[in-house]
Amino acid sequence: MLGLKLPTDPRWVNIAEKNIEEILVDHAYCEQKAASSCISLIVQYPDRAKLRDVLMPVVAEEWGHFRMVLRELDKRGYPLGPPRKDEYVAQLHAAIEKNSPVTERLGEKLFVNALIEARSCERFRLLSEEISDESLRSFYRDLMISEANHYVNFIDLAKEYLPAEYVRQRWQEWLDIEADIIRKLALRGDRMH
């Protein structure tokens, strides 16, 4: 369903499980950034009522996820620690076509958010199926379902504001861009992406 063209290296989940504190910290910041990203879109495009209506619940849900991850950190006695640079997200943002018309720029941002949600969903699935900590398995299964819904929200919003054929074609281009980024990034088990 996610359409990602390159799956996560199967070794990632084993490395991540050995670095669960780092994964949880990075995950907390991913949730915070997801909420912030949705707020930014709402503020940047105040005339897009449908965008606001769709993303306001996502903001609340992402912030709720941030709080849930903080509780998981607290349960384990792990501090939140400082934010981390997300090279994956930075490279996605660098690929945005910045000189395009306003509506197409909105589409670019929606596609990037959809990719981040899709990759997160894929990684949550891996964690929910393969780590030994049963409570974290359940935790990541619930989050996986939510992230899949968020991915769909961003694609549906792109279809709301852009022609269907453009969305189909540009989404395929973005899937290629994302696969290339994943292929070139070093395999790290201390980051969610």
Image: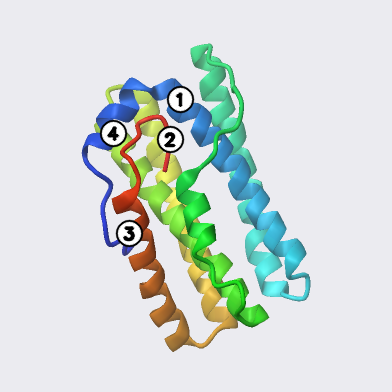
Whether pointer 1 and pointer 2 mark residues with C-beta atoms closer than 8 Å, the reply is yes
Please state which of residues 96 and 33 is positioned toward the viewer in this rendering: 96
Question: Pointer 2: what residue?
Answer: 191
Residue mark closest to the camera, 4 vs 2: 2
Question: Pointer 1: what residue?
Answer: 22
Q: Is residue 86 above or below residue 49?
A: above
Please state which of residues 170 and 186 is positioned toward the viewer in this rendering: 186
Q: Of label 4 and label 2, which has the lower sequence position?
A: 4
Work out how far the residue at label 3 is from the one at label 4, CA to CA, in angstroms. 20 Å
Residue mark closest to the camera, 1 vs 3: 3
Name which residue lies at 54% across and 39% down: 85
Q: Residue pushed farthest left? A: 10
Helix, strand or loop for disc 2: loop
Question: Pointer 4: what residue?
Answer: 13
Question: Pointer 3: what residue?
Answer: 180
Q: Is residue 113 visible?
A: no
Name which residue lies at 60% across and 32% down: 83
- On-image quarter of the C terminus: top left
Q: Of label 1 and label 3, which has the lower sequence position?
A: 1
Count neighbours of disc 3 (C-alpha within 10 A) and say few if under 14, some if 14 to 19, many if 20 or more: few
Name which residue lies at 55% across and 84% down: 162
